[in-house]
Structure formats: C-alpha cells, structure tokens
Amino acid sequence: MLITAAQVADTLPGLSPTDALLVQKVREADAWAKLAFGRQFERGVYALKPRVYGAPYVLLQESPIRAVVSAFSDPTGLFQASTQIRDVSKFTFNPLPGDDDNRLDLGGYALPQGVGTFLLNVEAGWWPADDPVHESDIPADLSGALIKRARVEFKRAVGVSDEETKQFTDEVILNSQRRYRR
C-alpha cells in the first residue's frame, strides 16, 4: 500500500485508523494510483519487456531502478537459458531513488530491436507505507496527494461538503504528480 489508514486518520481528527470506510477509501486510493499512473510503485522484482529501438538505453515501466537481477535477449521471444546475458553489471541506471528515473543504459549491448525481444528482471520501486520491516521511502509529494484523495473521498462518502471536497478532482493529482506516470 502506498499510504496507510493511520496516515489519513491523522488528518481527520477523532477518526480511528481502523474505521472500515476509511480503510476502504485508502485501498481505493492505492488501486486508483496504480491504474492511473500505469505502474506498481512498491519495491519488488519485476519481469519487464521494454521496447528496444536501437538506442543505447531502454525506458522501464517500473522505477526507480534498484538493481538488475537478470536479462535475456532473444529475437524469438522464447528467453531460454542460452539467451541470458551473463554480465548484467554493464547495465547502468540512476542510483538516486528520489529522481524516479526509469532509464536503463544498455552498457554497449546490441539488442534485437522490437517488442518482446528483451526480458529484464529488475528490482525497482519504493518500500511501501505498510511494510513491517522497512521504513517507507515513497516520495512525500506522492503520498501526500494520495492521502488527500483518500481523505476527500472519505468526507464525500459520509456527506461532508467543504471547500476541499468541492475543489478536489483526480485531475488535480494527475497534473501535479505527472512525473510518476508511465
């Protein structure tokens, strides 16, 4: 989850983070963000098939890139053991997670051009807000926008009409957080 019910409850005095409607609105905000921005955000290992256009880099759907786990190059798209690129250390990427850079430099590898010719397993994303072991490193601007969305949707669901609920739209988030779109 990109945000928690506790984070939203902190902005609504007197509301418990275990309130069922609040929990539902937090889950909806999380699902909406993943759909609207076209990515998962949470840190994990992702199998990606980026398009290869002959450029010395590819752009990935998930970011920030934390590590390249494995890579396969196969013009047939079968990706068997014989097509594995053995030295993934040549691939380079921006190591600063705050930049949310989705560019992976290919390190001089000449890959077959097209869609589905390159399979890449990368560790990417941020630690989620509900991770029991790691402190969340989701950017504050993104989590703040999603907390606001959950808060507004909760207020609307219980019939509160104020300036915030009248002025807020999903487009506000999409425009202010467009750097996260894929």
Image (cartoon, rainbow, N blue to C red):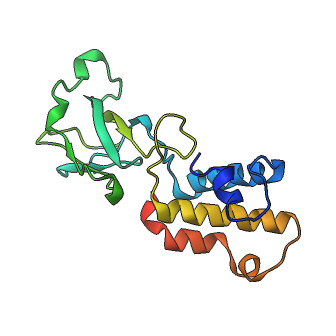
**In the picture provided, is 112 more to the left or to the right than 64?**
left
Q: Is residue 55 above or below residue 78?
A: below
Q: Residue at x 45, y 60 (%)?
A: 180
Q: Is residue 176 above or below residue 94?
A: below
The image quadrant where one finds the N terminus is top right
Q: Quadrant of residue 85?
A: top left
Residue 5 in percent (x, y) is at 69, 51
Q: Residue at x 64, y 67 (%)?
A: 148
Residue 65 visible, this orientation: yes
Residue 142 in percent (x, y) is at 51, 62
**In the picture provided, is 178 more to the left or to the right than 109?**
right
Furthest residue toward top: 81
Q: Nearer the viewer, residue 44 or 163?
A: 163
Q: Is residue 99 above or below residue 111?
A: below
Residue 53 visible, this orientation: no
Q: Residue at x 66, y 56 (%)?
A: 29
Residue 158 in percent (x, y) is at 87, 64
The image quadrant where one finds the C terminus is bottom left
Q: Quadrant of residue 77?
A: top left
Q: Nearer the viewer, residue 130 or 49?
A: 130
Furthest residue toward front: 14
Q: Is residue 78 above or below residue 43?
A: above
Furthest residue toward left: 108
Q: Residue at x 71, y 78 (%)?
A: 164
